[in-house]
Image: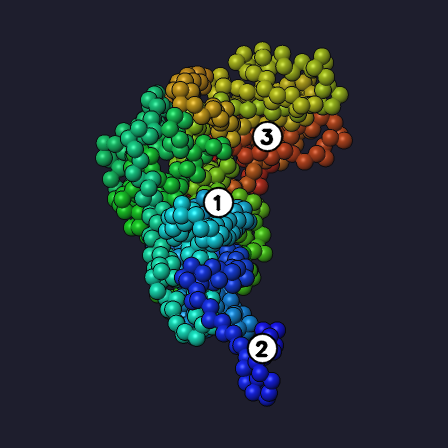
Amino acid sequence: MNNGLLRASLDPGPERRKYGITAYNHPLNLTKEQLTEMAMMTTSVDVLVSICVIFAMSFVPASFVLFLIEERVSKAKHLQFVSGVKPILYWLANFSWDMLNYTVPATMVVLIFICFQQQSYVSETNLPALILLLLLYGWSITPLMYPASFLFSVPSTAYVVLTSINLFIGINGSIATFVLELFVDEHLNEVNRILKKVFLIFPHFCLGRGLIDMAKNQAMSDAFQRLGTKQTLDPLQWDFVGKNLFAMAVEGLIFFIFTILLQYKFFINFRPWWSEPEVPPLGPEDEDVARERERVISGKAQSDILTMIDLSKVYKAGKMPAVDRLCLGIPRGECFGLLGVNGAGKTSTFRMLTGDTSITYGEAFLNHHSVTTEMERVHQLMGYCPQFDAISDLLTGREHLELYARLRGVSEESVAKVAQWGVTKLGLTQYSEREAGGYSGGNKRKLSTAISLIGAPPVIFLDEPTTGMDPKAKRFLWNCIVSVTKEGRAVVLTSHSMEECEALCTRMAIMVNGRFQCLGSVQHLKNRFGDGYTIVLRLMDNISEPASCPISSFMQSSFPSIELKERHQSVLQFQLPSHACCLARVFEVLANNHEELGIIDFSVSQTTLDQVFVNFAKEQTDDDVLTDVIISNSTVQTKLTTLVNRVNPPTILPLPPITPPQPSKQTAKSSGSKPKEGQSKKPKSGKVKSKEGKANGEKSSSMAMTQIPQKEEKAQRTSRRASGGSDSSSGGVQGEASQSSKRKAESSSKNPSALFIVDGNTQDSVL
């Protein structure tokens, strides 16, 4: 239009076309703020890419703690420490393996970026920065996850929690700082600068913010290129990704050192003075326990392989101690049994001695090496079978033994021989090549016991080694433990089986509320705390009603101190103090009157170890208030004194030295003539049977039983059997009812007591 008006005003002619108006537009250069705003707008899409990377890389490091938690909970980690692994070596090995695993997903991320040609991350200058960001993120985030293995007990819970934390910090921190940069408010910009410095302590933020800064740098380069200016900004500069890389490099080292300090309980050892737990007064205790305490404190237990001096454990200040000032010395070649109900303090004692938990008060020495200050040396001298099987489900039994043989320092050429010895010793030959996760409960306990025997340690701790075993496997394991003690090594075991302690232990103690309530050999505890003899009568069915049964009044008149304990249908159980009368008198009275009283059979036995244990177990309390401990101690002592006063007051003699018991045989006969062979009377005679020998080293409790036929149809009944043996320290009546297979004992009604031969035979002990 303008050109038309111009040409219309000119003279006519062809020259008018040479004239015209041309417009040229030259915009002003963009300012720095305008370039930054443009880069921000183009970077918004790349922010989503960085968030996706953060999301993916939050799951990987959280998975590294799953196996660590499983090892800690199953005690496999502690068992490795006991076998000689140093904590720093354990964590270095885990860190190296985790970093190798981390490189797989990190490499996949880089390959995905290369495939899609994201120039913000795979250009010539950005690719090295991307690789460094991913590698240093793994370097720093992996040790940051390790402390969580001390907090969680369920691996799946830890995985969910750690993943959520990683996502929250990584995504929220990166987006918050990016959004604040879009505002022009000076105050918000100052807050953003502070946040970006504070958030550098989190590897998640360093990765996410580093990816955003790389995208922003590429957008700035593209903007300059469109203006014809080629300006290349190095992404490794301090203001871009450099500070993030440096922060992650330092954090990886700091977090790893923090994990090592946690493993060495560095922060637990430095407790403030006001949080020191209080220990209640010692109070009165049993004379055997006091004698052992005096022996240990006076220094007479210097030759013992294991010594505990006032060993105590308080889990929380103001609460009852889990273990309360135990004093004990265990010599070489002894099998010491620790009995107690759940919560009595047995496992806590083992945990302190093996270094699994700290000692609150007191000291323990293993071969003169302190448990508190020389734990690595102590671990070399002990074998440990934890309460629950510390085995890996994916390794075979032979691989377990080979692993722990190497940890024990066995030379490489002898590892296979040692593993084969363990397989053969514990009877695992047919299962040695199977994965341990498919083992039965008994075979798992065998494998755990075999691991504790690797390296021939002088002291072996077995925490309920036969739990879940069938009788055959249990007896087999007993023989293995006996053979270990015969080699001169000390064994300390906990158990709920009284039969097991009788078979294996040369000495034992019963724990109640963290303290020893009694201490000594099995027979010594029976003599001191037993309630005399238990008489069990089985009556005929037709006189089972109390009104028509004169037996109670007859027993009361014959034995004034007898007491009826239980009555079940036609079975009566009486308790007779040992000082009331001799065994011969009991047999005589019952044999002479069995027909009139309608007794089918009867048995007389000494108080079993189970009854002694139950008497003490009643004192166990679940109340953990500290003030109740003092009351409980005095109550225990009062009841203990009452219990002892019911029995003959024993003469307190020094305990005999711990030596293998020698086989002894005593035969005592009740009053009456010796039965003659080949002489038969009317069927009033009965047979006396004795239970055959028990396990190696087991002493049989004194018990005799007779079968008295009443009617012709009753004559086919099998005679009852029961075992027993009493070995009084004051030289009382000892014995077990026995019958020789070469003689048949028959007696007339005039001499019924001659039917019974009370034999104090003690089975030969392999100990």
Look at mark 2 in the image and give the residue it sits on. Answer: 9
Name the element at disc 3: strand
**Location of residue 80 in the rendering, given as x and y in whole percent from the top left corner:** 40, 54
Q: Is residue 325 left or right of residue 67?
A: left
**Is 486 or 287 nearer to us in this picture?**
287
At label 1, which amino acid type do we have? Phe
Name the element at disc 1: loop
Q: Is residue 9 left or right of residue 107?
A: right
Mark number displayed over residue 705: 3
Residue furthest to the front in view is: 11
Look at mark 1 in the image and give the residue it sits on. Answer: 152
Q: CA distance from mark 2 to mark 3?
A: 149 Å
Of mark 2 and mark 1, the one earlier in the sequence is 2
Observer-side mark, 2 or 1, equals 2
Q: Quadrant of residue 217?
A: bottom left
Q: Is residue 496 above or below residue 399?
A: above
